[in-house]
Image (cartoon, helix red, strand yellow):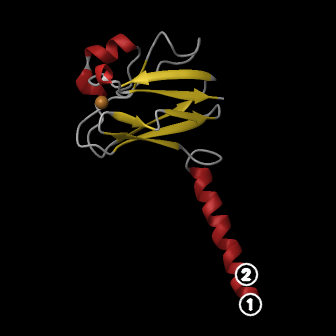
Amino acid sequence: MRRRQALRLVGSAGLAGLAGCLGGPGGPKTVEMVGLEFRPRRVSVPVGGTVEWVNESDIAHTVTAYGDRIPDGAAYWASGGFGGEEAARDDLERGLIGAGERYSHTFEAAGEHPYFCVPHEGSGMVGVVAVG
Ligand SMILES: [Cu+2]
């Protein structure tokens, strides 16, 4: 009996440790790309939190911040590692996240970070990361 309890304690401590490695308390938030949508469309993380996008669809997408709508002083972010929105729009290929691929970003600036998918913005493929 005592041994079983000890094993259970070790088990939960191990899981807590793993979650810590995956991006702080609670680990990263996941946004799925399904069809022409980000799900959930709006996600919240604390300052220093990470969001991971997973492409569950069979077509490629981008995750591209609106350069003039992210918080003042925030570093620009986009799949492909672009320095700004215009560059991201101009080089679609580099920003694409293929089927089954992932992209993640860690957010240091509090506030709303609206973003979109370059090829499917016109179809309403947009989302928001709320930080803080
Ligand atoms: Cu898309």
x and y, in percent, of residue 13 in the image: 68, 65
x and y, in percent, of residue 109 in the image: 61, 23
Up/down of 103 relative to 19, above or below: above
Q: Which mark is residue 21?
A: none
Q: Estimate the spatial distance between the alpha carbons at disc 1 and disc 2, rounded to whole Å.
A: 6 Å
Kindly tell me whether residue 77 is visible in this rendering.
Answer: no
Q: Are marks 1 and 2 in contact (CB under 8 Å)?
A: yes
Give the residue type at disc 1: Met
Q: Quadrant of residue 12?
A: bottom right
Where the N terminus falls, by quadrant? bottom right
The image position of residue 25, as x and y in percent, is 65, 47
Of residues 55 and 84, which is closer to you in this image?
A: 55
Graded by Cα atoms within 10 Å as few (under 14), some (14 to 19) or many (20 or more), the crowding at tag 1 reads few
Residue 68 versus residue 13 in the image, above or below: above
| Horizontal relation, residue 3 to residue 58: left or right | right
* Residue identifier under label 1: 1
- Whether ligand 1 has any atom under 8 Å from the Cβ at mark 1 is answered as no
Disc count in the image?
Answer: 2
Beta carbon of the mark 2 residue lies under 8 A of ligand 1: no
Residue at image point 67% right, 76% down: 8
| Residue count near mark 2 (Cα–Cα under 10 Å), binned few <14, some 14–19, many ≥20 | few
> Which residue is at the far bottom?
1
Residue at 23% x, 38% y is: 59
Among the 4 quarters of the image, the one containing residue 83: top left
Q: Say what secondary structure mark 1 lies in.
A: loop
Q: Is residue 94 above or below residue 66?
A: below
Image quadrant where one finds the C terminus: top right
Q: Which mark is residue 5?
A: 2
